[in-house]
């Protein structure tokens, strides 16, 4: 099925559902289309068309997106990271809102922070479709999008407009390169130069498995050159745009790394991150590994691309702890990979994460998963005697 047909079918299904008048009106959708009786209809939609439909739903605050009930407060989860307050440590990973179209609505859904992107300098379509596959038996997704992006100009306009009335949350910008660019540094510098003034933090993404040669940038010397150049560009850009503000106005720069690293790679990444002054690491991106435990049909499992969701939880959480130890807890870590419960978020926090992100859980459970994770995380903290989420960060590595 082509993407165009998938999108047409997706909106046809939504139209049919709305036409039934089944317990909701368009402006306030009550039906659980993710795990309720209508979920089989949603699962029938092409995954990429469903992604586009979700962005559309978020825009109009349908199906639980942007609902005020999600904004209930959890004082135990309030934390300060990068010198700024976060309502909770739970955020949305890059990849959902690729072009910064629904940032405000996603924060109103209950995310404390939203990371947009990956954003490339020039618009590009990404890889051929189909390029997204649900592994329902494994609560996982394989994607090979390939940095499909409307480009930096479109994102800048939206982020600039957003900055006039900032949402009640933190906005991160994930930066990528165009597929055909040979000098990657020029692409990263270009996006940072354009978007740094509108970002609460920046992310250098060198770990997507879907852009040829991208992961090679994680090699020690290549990474050092790239990060040094990007940090220099960020500093120059912010100094020019905010000349009267202190160094605290600099948006922190983070590096997003792959889960598929050798021990030598892990050590060199930690070394470079500390030496060049990176503010944090996001651990981790999707994996090219296909665990033997996968239960989904072999045809889907063999699809090329990055695997996300539940099968990534164990390896990404283990890597999180390794990088916490290798960096001596000196830089901020954001844990991502397989988070769909408060217990899983808690385990990443104990492994050294100051913040956590999710994405695939949103695919399977919908917006309600955000409040569920926060509520369960509070229960975990109370169970183990922590008075705040900050007190639990890195708890697995403390001597009793």
Image (cartoon, rainbow, N blue to C red):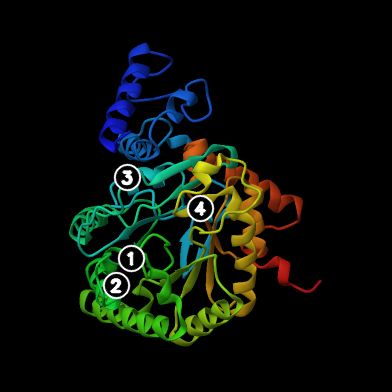
Q: Earlier in the sequence, mark 3 or mark 2?
A: 3
SS for callout 4: strand
Do callouts 1 and 2 mark residues in contact (Cβ within 8 Å)? yes
The spot of residue 362 in percent (x, y) is 48, 42
Q: Earlier in the sequence, mark 2 or mark 4?
A: 2
Residue hosting label 3: 129
Circle on res. 175 = 1
Rate crowding at label 3 as few (under 14), some (14 to 19) or many (20 or more) other CA atoms within 10 Å. Answer: few
- Asked if residue 378 can be seen in this view, the reply is yes
SS for callout 3: loop
User: Which is more toward the observer, 121 or 71?
Assistant: 121
Residue hosting label 2: 188
Q: Is label 1 or label 3 in front?
A: 3
Q: Earlier in the sequence, mark 1 or mark 2?
A: 1
Left or right of residue 171: residue 280: right
Rate crowding at label 4 as few (under 14), some (14 to 19) or many (20 or more) other CA atoms within 10 Å. Answer: many
When asked about the image quadrant of residue 15, the answer is top left
Do callouts 3 and 2 mark residues in contact (Cβ within 8 Å)? no
SS for callout 1: strand
Circle on res. 307 = 4
The spot of residue 102 in percent (x, y) is 31, 45
- Asked if residue 370 can be seen in this view, the reply is no
Q: Is label 3 or label 2 in front?
A: 3
């Amino acid at each position: 099925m082509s993407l165009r047909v998938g999108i047409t079918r997706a909106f046809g299904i939504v139209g049919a559902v709305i036409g039934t008048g089944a317990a909701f009106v368009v402006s306030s959708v009550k039906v659980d289309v993710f795990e309720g009786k209508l979920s089989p209809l949603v699962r029938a939609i092409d995954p990429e068309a469903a992604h586009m439909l979700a962005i559309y739903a978020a825009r109009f605050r349908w199906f639980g997106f942007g609902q005020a009930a999600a904004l209930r407060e959890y004082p135990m989860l309030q934390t300060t990271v990068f010198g700024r307050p976060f309502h909770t440590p739970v955020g949305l990973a890059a990849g959902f809102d690729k072009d910064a179209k629904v940032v405000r609505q996603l924060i109103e859904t209950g995310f404390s922070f939203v990371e947009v992107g990956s954003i490339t300098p020039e618009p590009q379509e990404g890889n051929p479709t189909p390029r997204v596959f649900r592994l329902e038996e494994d609560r996982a997704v394989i994607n090979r999008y390939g940095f499909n992006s409307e480009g930096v100009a479109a994102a800048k306009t939206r982020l600039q407009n957003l900055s006039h009335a900032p949402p009640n949350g933190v906005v991160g910008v994930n930066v990528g390169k165009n597929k055909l660019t040979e000098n990657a540094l020029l692409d990263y510098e270009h996006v940072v130069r354009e978007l740094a003034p509108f970002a609460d933090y920046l992310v250098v993404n060198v770990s997507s498995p879907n852009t040829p040669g991208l992961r090679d940038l994680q090699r020690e010397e290549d990474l050092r050159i790239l990060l040094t150049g990007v940090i220099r560009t960020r500093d120059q850009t912010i100094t020019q745009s905010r000349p009267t503000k202190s160094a605290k106005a600099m948006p922190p720069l983070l590096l997003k790394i792959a889960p598929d690293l050798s021990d030598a790679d892990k050590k060199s990444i930690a070394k470079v991150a500390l030496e060049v002054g990176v503010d944090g690491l996001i651990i981790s991106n999707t994996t090219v590994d296909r665990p033997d435990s996968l239960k989904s049909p072999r045809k889907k499992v063999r699809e090329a691309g990055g695997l996300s969701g539940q099968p990534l939880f164990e390896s990404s959480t283990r890597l999180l702890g390794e990088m916490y130890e290798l960096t001596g807890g000196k830089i901020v870590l954001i844990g991502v990979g397989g988070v769909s419960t408060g217990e899983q978020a808690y385990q990443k926090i104990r492994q050294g994460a100051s913040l956590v992100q999710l994405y695939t859980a949103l695919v399977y459970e919908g917006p309600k998963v955000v409040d569920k994770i926060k509520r369960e995380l509070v229960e975990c903290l109370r169970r183990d005697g922590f008075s705040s989420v900050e007190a639990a960060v890195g708890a697995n590595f403390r001597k009793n």
